[in-house]
Image (cartoon, rainbow, N blue to C red):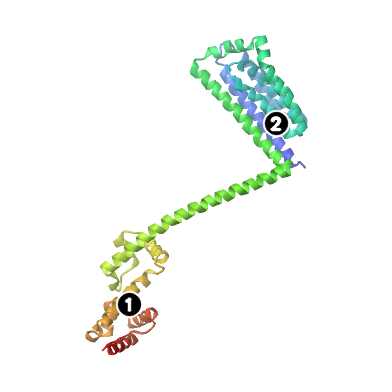
Amino acid sequence: MLSTVEKIQQVFIRRFTLLMIVESIIRFIICLSFTEKLYAFILAGISVTFVVFYIFSAKGLLKPFHNIILILSLYFLSHYFYVMGAYKFIPITVFWFLIIPMALRIYFSNKIWILSLLPVAASIIFIPQVSAFVGIPSQYKMIILDNYELPTVEFIVNFFIAVIVLYIVFTAYYLWKVLIIQNPKLKMYYNLLRKLKKADQDSIFEEDSKDNQSIRDARLLGVYELIIHYIESSKCYLDSDYTLEQLASELKIHKNTVSISLSHIGQISFKGLLNKYRINAAKDLFDNDKFRENNIKQIYMGVGFKHNTTFNRVFKQSEGITPSEYIISLAKKKMNTM
C-alpha cells in the first residue's frame, strides 16, 4: 500500500508532465508562425515524447526513481537551448532551472537536493559564455525576435514569465505537502500558524460582529423612539382593535422590525406596550374622579379594553392592586390631605 508521500509523488509527476505537454504545445503553435520552422519541428517531437512518457507513467510502467530522473532530464534538455538563446534578452529565464532541485526534493533527501544545486548553479553561470561561444543569441534573435513587432515580443516574454511562475508555484505546492509530512516540527509550526491566523480572523469577525450589532442596535433604537412618539401622539392604543400590522403600515416599517425593536429595545411586546398606555390612561381618569361621572365599564372600554376581566387582570399586573382597590387608596389619600 502506498504511503501518503508516495501518493503525492505520483500525483505530482503526472500533473507536472501534463504541464510540460501543454507548455510545449503552446510553444510549438507560436513557432509555427516563424519563417524558420526548425524550432517548431523540435517542439513537436518534444510534445510527442512527453505524451508517451505520460502514458508510461500513468500505467505504472516506470518506477518512481526512473520517473523523476527521466522527466527532469527531459525538462532540462527541452529548456536548456531555449534559456541559452533567450538569456541575453530575458535573463529571468534561468528560473526554469530552479524547478529541478525543488522537484528532486519531493522524491529524495536534503542531501540529494543540495547536490542538485551544483549542476543547476553551473548551468546558470556558464549559460552566457556557452551561448555566446556557439552563437545561439544571434540565431535566436534572428529566428524569433526579428519576426515580430515589439508588442508581440512583449506579449511572448510576459507569457513565458507567467509560465515560469506557474511551474515554480506548482512545484512549491507539492514540495510543501511533502515537507509537512516528513518534518513533524514544521507541521507543528504550520498548525500553530494556522491556529493563530484563525484566531486573528475570529477576532476580526468578532469586531465586525460588534460593529454590525452596534449599527443594528442604533437602527432599532430609532425605530423604537418613532413607535413611542407615534403611539403617544396618535393615542392609537385607545382603539381596542388596534393591531401590530396597522402600526407597521402607518409607520411604513415592516412589522417584524417593529416587533423586534419593541422586544430588543423596550423589552416589551406590542400588546404589552398598548396595555401599559391603556392602564396609565385609566389611572388618569381615576385620579380625576371620572369614575364618579362614568362607571367602571365606561372607563375600561374608553381606554381600549373590551372586557372587565382583562382590565382587572392587566391593571393588577401593572399596579399590584385591582382597580377597585386603587380607587379606595385614592380616596384615603384625599382624606389624609384634607
Q: Position of residue 54 (x, y in %)?
A: 69, 29
Where, quadrant-wise, is the N terminus in this rendering? top right
State the residue at coordinates (67%, 29%): 17
The amino acid type, in three-letter code, at marker 1 is Ile
Q: Nearer the viewer, residue 300 or 189?
A: 189
Q: Residues within 10 Å of mark 2 (few under 14, many from 20)?
A: many
* Displayed quadrant of residue 116: top right
State the residue at coordinates (43%, 56%): 214
**261 vs 121: above or below:** below
Q: Position of residue 47 (x, y in %)?
A: 65, 22
**297 vs 211: above or below:** below
Which residue is tagged 1?
279
Instruction: Using the rendered image of the protein, determine whether residue 128 is visible from the camera's viewpoint.
Output: yes
Which residue is tagged 2?
103
State the residue at coordinates (41%, 63%): 260
Instruction: Using the rendered image of the protein, determine whether residue 246 is visible from the camera's viewpoint.
Output: no
> Which mark, by number, is residue 203?
none
Callout 2: helix, strand or loop? helix
Q: Position of residue 20 (x, y in %)?
A: 64, 26
Q: Nearer the viewer, residue 62 or 72?
A: 72
Q: Position of residue 309 (x, y in %)?
A: 35, 83
Where, quadrant-wise, is the C terminus in this rendering? bottom left
| Circle nearer the N terminus (2, 1) | 2
